Amino acid sequence: MKIRFRLTLWYFSITLFILLLFSLGIYLSMQRVLFRSLDQDLTEIADVVEQSYNDSLATFDILQLDSEKTDPFLDYYLVIYNRKKEVIFRSALAEQISLEVPFSAPGDPERATLKIFLRHPIPRLHPGKKGEIAFRAINRELRYQGKRLGWITVARPIEQLEESQHRLLQILFVAILIVVALIGASGYLLTRKALAPVDVIARRANQISHSNLNRRIEGVSPGDELGTLAETLNNLLERLERAFQSQQRFMADAAHELKTPLSVLRAHWEEELNNPELSLPMKEKLARDVETISRLTHLINNLLLLSRTEQIRENFDFSEVRLDEVLDEVVADAAILAEMKEQRLVSEHQESVTLRGDRSRLYQLFFNIVDNAIKYTQPGGEVSIRLRRIGGEAVVEIRDNGPGIPSEDLPHIFERFYRVKKDRARQTGGSGLGLSICQLIARVHNGKIEVESQPGQGSLFRVRLPLEEGEKQAAKS
Ligand code: ADP
């Protein structure tokens, strides 16, 4: 999972957790406040009842209840007991329902929340309401001049309180939803913004390869952690570039040093070949040695070319080149090789195509690919070469029906000295440099090479080279 999603998820979960805790706190304290004020209300009613009896007790016995004094409380559940816990008064509501509230101990009112089930609606209670209904009730002593007269139970339905709780829950739920959604969205945007330089670093780093090691990762503001990461990567690139340059210098120097003695050796051997006193077997041996020296010189030339990637353009001689003619030349030279393997070599192009390029390098590029196709295809196979103009490009396709290239090797065949395993074991005479040279030549011409291959069915090498402006116009018309 992407870091930005993980961070957002963390944000989201932590905020949700904190909000839930916070809401639970609000809910519980609000519940306490509501119950406390309700209990206070009930206590006050009990006080008023007690007071009104106290005022008249000097003249009346508690058993002589004056219903007028209890009138204001008729909407409440009100029950008064005497010392023997016998009921001496019930309010109208208490006539219809009965709540079992425990009798309180002296000085400590008993509080309880009770639920009863109403089968029919009761006139004094929520007109029309039936079913389960909850009451908050208190029971406390009634006292006169320090002596217990009896007990009083006062109760009220807590429907309103429950409604307030319910509303609070709804408000908290909506608030949590909104806050969590806002925090989640802003968390996602923030992390995306904070991590945007990582994308920049990854994109820039992906664009850097051995051919443009002098490029650096830019566009990341220095000073923060990601800026430090970019700087570290740039330092690494710097060291890599230096190492690469010294490796190339070493390759160029070594190749250069080897070239001179080899040409001296070759000249010497060729001179010896003309010696009439030399026996035939000796001449044959010398000829094979000269051939080996030629191959070695060719390899060294390739190494020199590959080692000069920096000033590579200077080694190319650009001019107007007829690509169809170059291909004809390649086909003519390769025909001998194909004939030796009894292969069919087919060339197909109807029009002339001109582009700016180095004629001999282009010859080298196409000869290498055609030579490979012939070399790796079994005797009796077929190799075809096709030139077309597509859009602003000259497209040359070299197709064979040889063994193909395994998919795991395909991404590597343009690497220097890379050879498919079985070809490395077989003595096909290659060095693994041919396709790297081809790719280098194509790049210098601003072109590219694509490969499609199915093991057992053959390979297709497609070389795309951009045409000149004039040629592009011709292609369009
Ligand atoms: P080599 O000198 O070995 O031919 P290249 O760089 O020209 O080196 O090619 C690299 C490898 O790609 C070869 O060793 C071979 O295994 C594989 N290859 C190239 N062209 C073909 C082809 N037409 N068919 C099958 N394999 C090929």
Image (tube, rainbow, N blue to C red):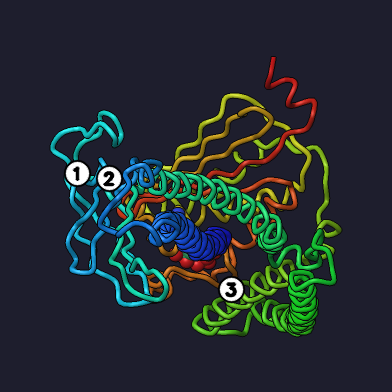
Left or right placement of residue 46 versus residue 273 in this view: left
Tell me the SS state at disc 3. Answer: helix
Instruction: List the residue tagged with mark 3.
Output: 291
Is mark 2 in CB contact (under 8 Å) with mark 1? yes
Q: Is residue 378 visible?
A: no
Mark 3: amino acid: Glu
Q: Residues within 10 Å of mark 3 (few under 14, many from 20)?
A: few
- Residue in front for this viewpoint, 264 or 110: 110
Instruction: Looking at the image, tell me whether mark 3 or mark 1 is earlier in sequence order.
Output: 1
Seen as rendered, the residue at the extreme top is: 477
Tell me the SS state at disc 2. Answer: loop
Q: Position of residue 64 (x, y in %)?
A: 27, 53
Counting every numbered tag in the picture gives: 3
As drawn, the label of residue 91 is: 2
* Mark closer to the observer (2, 3): 2
Tell me the SS state at disc 1. Answer: helix
Mark 2 to mark 3 CA distance (whole Å): 128 Å
Decide: is 450 above or below 407: above
Left or right placement of residue 461 versus residue 258 in this view: left
